[in-house]
Amino acid sequence: MSQPIFCQRLKTTKVSNEVFDVFLDNVARIGDPQILLALLGGSLIGMLFGLIPGLGGIQALTICLPFTFGWDPQVAMFLFAGIMGSVTKGGSIPAILINTPGMAPNACTCLDGFPLARRGEAGRAIGLAASSCVLGSLLGVVVLLLLLPVVRLLIFAFGPPEFFWLIMFGIVAIAFVARGNFLKGLVAGGLGILISLIGYSEVFGVRRFTLSSDYLWDGINLVPFFIGIFAIGELLSYTTRGGVISSKGIHVRGLSSVFDGFREIFRYPATFFRGSFIGVVVGLIPGIGGSVANFLSYTAAVQMSKKPETFGKGNPEGIVASESSNDAKDGGALLPTLGFGIPGSPEMAVLLGAFMLHGLQPGPFLLKEHPEIAVSLIAGLVIANLISSGLMIVGADQLAKVTLIPVRYIAPVVVVIGLAGAYAVRGNLWDVLLAIIAGLFGYTLRRHGFPVIPLVMGFILGVLAETAFYQSFKMGLGSYSVFFSSPISLSLFALVLLLLLYPFLQQLRRRK
Amino acid sequence: MSTFKKGSLVFEFLLLIFLALVIVSVFGYKKDSRLVPLVVAVPTTIICIIVIAGEFFPKLSQIFELDLGRVTEERQKYRFQGPQEHQDRIPWSKIFKLWFWIIGYFVVMLLFGFAVATPLFLLLFLKLYCEARTWVAIVFSLVLFTSIWVMFHLGANIDFFEGVIFKGVLPPL
């Protein structure tokens, strides 16, 4: 029987208050020197990784993952929030000053940022990018805070069968949105689940796929696997490219022009709100990265403009559209990640790995049992945006010099720190070898069009999916009907089916 | 069929063999513990077979190339080169050359320990692979090694592997 409306309202208000209480408690904790240091460090690391074209948030998070082992999970979350909140800002600096986007989501910033810089208005472009990022991220966080209590209510309806379908939906959805062939994404997701099942199963008390190896008894360790897939694998293609990122650049002269640019955002409210809205919506869709939000927002700005011909020639609105969507996306992407354990963006997939490393189970129960983790990430994201914008305004010129380092010099740094991190978590030398092998495996997958994000998703959620499957099976006394007995299960199953059938539906539509 | 397509086909066949081995080995486990591996491995194998078939019949493959909105079109319009386009052109010899450098670093670490392997790897890699000047290589490797040592050993209290020659104990494999 459904509850009376006033009871539901009362419950919603109670949950909202609880979330805001935890939020205020955590905001008060920010004065803690450990947290401040984590935020500052995260912001700086994020900016540096964002600045170097080819590297980005995923690599920064992966490299930092082992360092946080043994930390208070909340402090670790502030570090991760610092990285996520600052990485796109780092990427916008070379986009404006040297016409090379630090990351794919900054690609559209080049189109108008660099022409502005060439006209001697680099400071204005930097200021505008900084304000678009800060305000965009604030808007994303506000939407997240408004939606969190609703999601928190929804997750009370989740049991093992619903959780199982949710994981399946997450993996299929991420394969669906990955670039290229949908089937290859599904194969990668399946491989990820199978890899996660290697080792001793606590549920069944048996060893599986261990090839009689003692090392594999504990399964494939998350940290070296991630370091291999994301850091070493990416590096293999990145370093072989060689060369110098840039030999010449445009300089920012005078802080006043930067501040003028910072204030200029208020002249383009429509572009800002539209870009931020697109960012939040794209963030809410599982697995879609910032580059999609960036292109959609920029295209919308061009199409809605009365002077579309000015875009690409130094129109400040181009920077606002591009950068506001980039940072608003983070708030949106946190919602499916925290609420359902489905990453809203590729960076969030690594964040789920970080949850596991810190003993936090991703999925609907995270928000219920550890609201402080969600709040740390949200508060961290806001403050990191302020810190990194400050750094961007004051030090863009100096930070841009990082791009003058030949890319080959970056490889040994990432290899040595990455492999030391792979070793550090368990003090096991074979973890280093695992990272190196996973690196080649990840590279080969990418080279042949298999996206690695579904692989990582399957790897993170595989054991959880198996446990949910087994619990549901026992709940249903050996009957599979338990998987289709609740409206939520049925809806999720229908969504999975719809995604799987979508290519055929699309084919039918094309024929018509 | 292009060399790249052939390479993809070989890789997809290897994946198929791996999945087939998983299915065969799963039957050696108890009923409960083989349920999920089978539920995952069987559909994955079937999908892998369709992927392989798609290499021979491009029309089949095209069905699963999803056109999500106009994003792909827009990306092409702005000529943004994603990582995939770049990776296709790198010869495997270059990739393996770099990968064996990393394997070499691991072997030296296994024999002589982290403290010897890391500065040695950095110095040789910078000098021979990156073709850096000798003084740059020396300074860079010393600064980086010292920073990592301070971060991990002094900061996080982690004892790095000493190397089997210096009586470091290897964990069971």
Image (spheres, grey):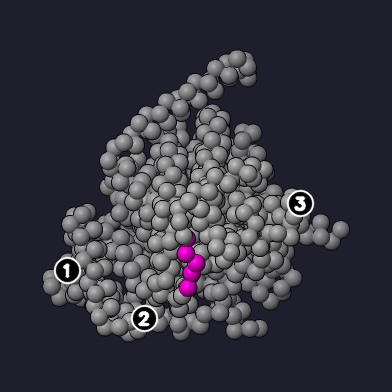
What residue sits 34% from the left and 51% below the top?
A: A41
Counting the numbered discs, the total is 3
Magenta segment: A248-252
> Magenta: predominant secondary structure element?
loop
Farthest residue to the right: give it.
A512
In the displayed structure image, the side of residue A229 where residue A449 appears, left or right: right
Seen from the viewer's position, the closer of residues B122 and A97 is: A97
Question: Does residue A12 show up?
Answer: yes
Q: Which numbered disc, 1 or 3, marks the residue closer to the eye? A: 3
Q: Give the spatial CA distance, label 2 vs label 1.
A: 28 Å
Q: Are marks 1 and 3 on the same chain?
A: no
Displayed quadrant of residue A35: top left
In the displayed structure image, the side of residue A486 where residue B126 appears, left or right: left
For marks 2 and 1 on the same chain, the one whose residue lies earlier in the sequence: 2
Q: Give the spatial CA distance, label 3 vs label 2.
A: 50 Å
Instruction: Decide whether residue A45 is among the magenta residues.
Output: no
Amino acid beneath label 1: Glu
Crowd class of label 3 (few under 14; some 14 to 19; many from 20; radius 10 Å)? few
Quadrant location of the C terminus of chain A in the rendered image: bottom right
In the displayed structure image, the side of residue A509 where residue B162 appears, left or right: left
Q: Callout 1: helix, strand or loop?
A: loop
The numbered dot on residue B130 is 2
Amino acid beneath label 2: Cys
Displayed quadrant of residue A175: bottom right
Q: Callout 3: helix, strand or loop?
A: loop
Question: Does residue A459 show up?
Answer: no
Q: Residue A245: x, y in percent? A: 47, 72
The residue indicated by pointer 1 is: B162
Dot 1: chain letter: B
The residue indicated by pointer 3 is: A306
What residue sits 46% from the left and 35% below the top?
A: A367
What residue sits 70% from the left and 66% below the top?
A: B77
